[in-house]
Amino acid sequence: MKSIALILGTVLLSNLSCAQSSDKIKNNMENLPKTLVEVPDGLEVATLGGGCFWCTEAIYQDLIGVEKVLSGYSGGYLVDPAYKQVTSGTTGHAEVIQFFYDPKLISFEEILEIFWSTHDPTTLNRQGADVGPQYRSAVFYHSESQKEKAEFYKNKLNESGSFDKPIVTEITPFSNFYVAENYHQNYFNDNGMQPYCQFVIRPKVEKFRKVFAEKLKN
């Protein structure tokens, strides 16, 4: 039988290694160049992660007031990651969409309502069969106003019991956004007959279009 001292020593070494690893990751994130987002006059920007970005992109492209939806990666500690690196689950990035929107036509509250209605925000690092931290539920806020609204409505949803389990959506300040490879952009519209589009994305989009019909572009 191992001695208590030996067990404790092993645990302490393990914790020290984890702490050093976490410090390295934190330093890498702090040293990453910050993404400067040039927002057109009269518009605002949002960055959201709700699982596979193909699904999220297909939903927000349909909304009145939403412009230039891009799929990409945020929240990690690797500069300009490639898709294969992100899907390994080792870069810290989430698959996200970033888009501009006209606050006169659609509010951030409405954007959040659609966000929490079109994916499962109670599953940690998972959406259906897509598993890993890259598929986490996340709001990368661009202002204190976005932060306050996201936290307020997350708390309200938890208090109301709208979901069977607590919402685990990460609400964190925006720092970086790397546009995904060209073949990921406009994916559902360009590849609608692909099996993933037919069996995963299409049912989500059809349900969304029924529930939020009044918010759709013609």
Image (cartoon, rainbow, N blue to C red):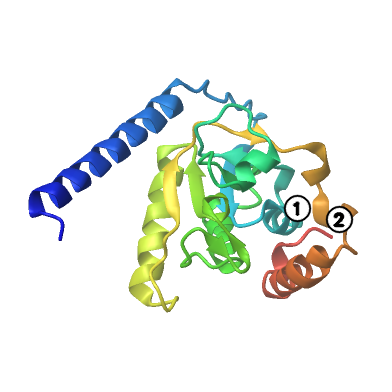
Q: Is 172 positioned to the left or the right of 182 in the image? A: left
| Res 103 seen here | no
In the image, which disc is placed on residue 189?
A: 2
Rendered view: 94 above or below 218: above
Q: Are marks 1 and 2 in contact (CB under 8 Å)?
A: yes
- Closer to the camera, 144 or 10? 10
Relative image position of residue 136 (x, y in whole percent): 52, 55
Relative image position of residue 139 (x, y in whole percent): 50, 49
Relative image position of residue 144 (x, y in whole percent): 40, 39
**In the rendered image, which quarter is residue 158 located in?**
bottom left
**In the rendered image, which quarter is residue 30 located in?**
top left
- Closer to the camera, 70 or 33? 33
Mark 1 or mark 2: which comes first in sequence? 1
- Closer to the camera, 1 or 9? 1
Which residue is disc 1 drawn over?
61
- Residue at the image position 31 percent from the left and 40 percent from the top: 18
Instruction: Give the amino acid at mark 1.
Output: Gln
Tell how many labels: 2
Instruction: Give the amino acid at mark 2.
Output: Asn
Rendered view: 72 above or below 166: above
Rendered view: 176 above or below 87: above
Neighbour tally class for label 1: few under 14, some 14-19, many 20 plus, Cα within 10 Å: some
Instruction: Provide the secondary structure element on which disc 1 rests.
Output: loop
